[in-house]
Image (cartoon, rainbow, N blue to C red):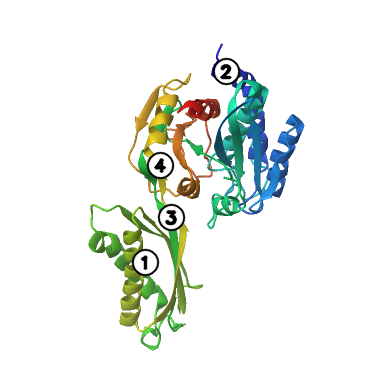
Amino acid sequence: MTVLEKLHKKLDGFYPEMVETRRYLHMHPELSFKEVETARYISDFYKILGIRPREHVGGNGVVARIKGGKPGKTIALRADFDALPIQEENDVPYQSQVPGVMHACGHDGHTAALLMLAKAIHEVKSELEGEYVFIHQHAEEYAPGGAKAMIEDGCLEGVDAIFGTHLWATVPVGHIQYRKGPFMAAADRFEVTIQGHGGHGAQPHLSKDAVVAGAQLVTNLQQVISRRINPIRSAVLTVGSFSSGDAFNIIADTAKITGTVRTFDEDVRDRVEKEIERIIQGTCLAADCTYDYDYFRGYPPVVNHEAETAFLADCAKEIEGVTQVEEVDPSMIGEDFAYYLQHVKGAFFFTGADPEKADPAYPHHHPRFDIHEKAMLIAAKTLGAAAIRYQNA
């Protein structure tokens, strides 16, 4: 039996504990930058194994290292562990016990999978080459995120390559999805406050209606992508919120609009930022209103390294339970795994996790989001195979 076969057999044996760990984390979610108890739980897990992890890495991050019995490369594996400000609507025994907070993106499953993989690698370490770095990252969901701070605090020190996965609830279990090169988009946000002049609803001529100006702005902003950006260059601009007014018979004094921009190319990113302000300026000038505009740069695009991604895909094809390995189109979703790939070679991929509870499956960040827990085992085996086989890549 090869060491990889031994590792996978151990992961099979750890599957009940993997599920128990995921469900515990699901019941006790914590928001980005507030994951104190989750970080402690992760650290305690390693301490019980006899491994002394680095705590408070870049904030609430935890990093554990396991050395093999033979010299070799240093491979990092990453899982995130923050939750979202969402009230869970699933009627399950492991429902979130924290009002208004939920693991609605699968980070509980990422953490459980990586912890069990670390435990399995620890048990066969004498037969392994190299060193394995387990990066448990806080605050993936909210920019500036945790990855950048953890890197600055040394989590990638000596690392030759890194691999990571996201359990993807709208993709069937058994499917592994990847893409060489640009895979996920840069994720920015913007905020606009329009300042009008409030007044009585019966006397619009004496006011400057922030609602009307805001409504026009929402419509006008649609021109940024459709008429200002080369259609061959991918970009998305979404207005996510519009808040204004307090009563039916009062002309609103102010309106606040927020949204997100997704791009792959830096020049497109720059152009969108400038075009948004140009359209705001023109719209507010026409309405005789003033404005405040803020554009916040979020995560850069996730750009997978070609050789490592091809290698990962080959590894995935050999994993029990994997029925399809496919290269897919880029996604406009953002991920701060991007920062790791700017520093070392590696690949990020999706592991299908459709729970088969609804058709179609509830998407990520939905109050009824859930995952098929068998996907965690597939994710752990795929990451483990990539880490071990990369020693000889």
Between 45 and 292, the residue placed more toward the observer is 45
* Mark 4, residue position: 304
* Mark 1, residue position: 273
Looking at the picture, does residue 148 appear above or below residue 29?
A: below
The structure residue drawn at horizontal position 60% and vertical position 33%, both measured from the top left corner, is 131
Between 178 and 215, the residue placed more toward the observer is 178
Of the two numbered discs 2 and 3 on the same chain, state the one appearing first in sequence: 2
User: For the view shown, which residue lies furthest in the front direction?
Assistant: 71
Q: CA distance from mark 4 to mark 1?
A: 25 Å
| Closer to the eye: label 3 or 4 | 4
The structure residue drawn at horizontal position 35% and vertical position 66%, both measured from the top left corner, is 218
**Marks 2 & 3, CB-CB < 8 Å contact:** no
Quick check: can you spot residue 93?
no
Between 17 and 56, the residue placed more toward the observer is 56
Q: CA distance from mark 1 to mark 2?
A: 51 Å
Query: Which quadrant, please, contains the C terminus?
Result: top left
Q: CA distance from mark 3 to mark 4?
A: 17 Å
**Marks 3 & 4, CB-CB < 8 Å contact:** no
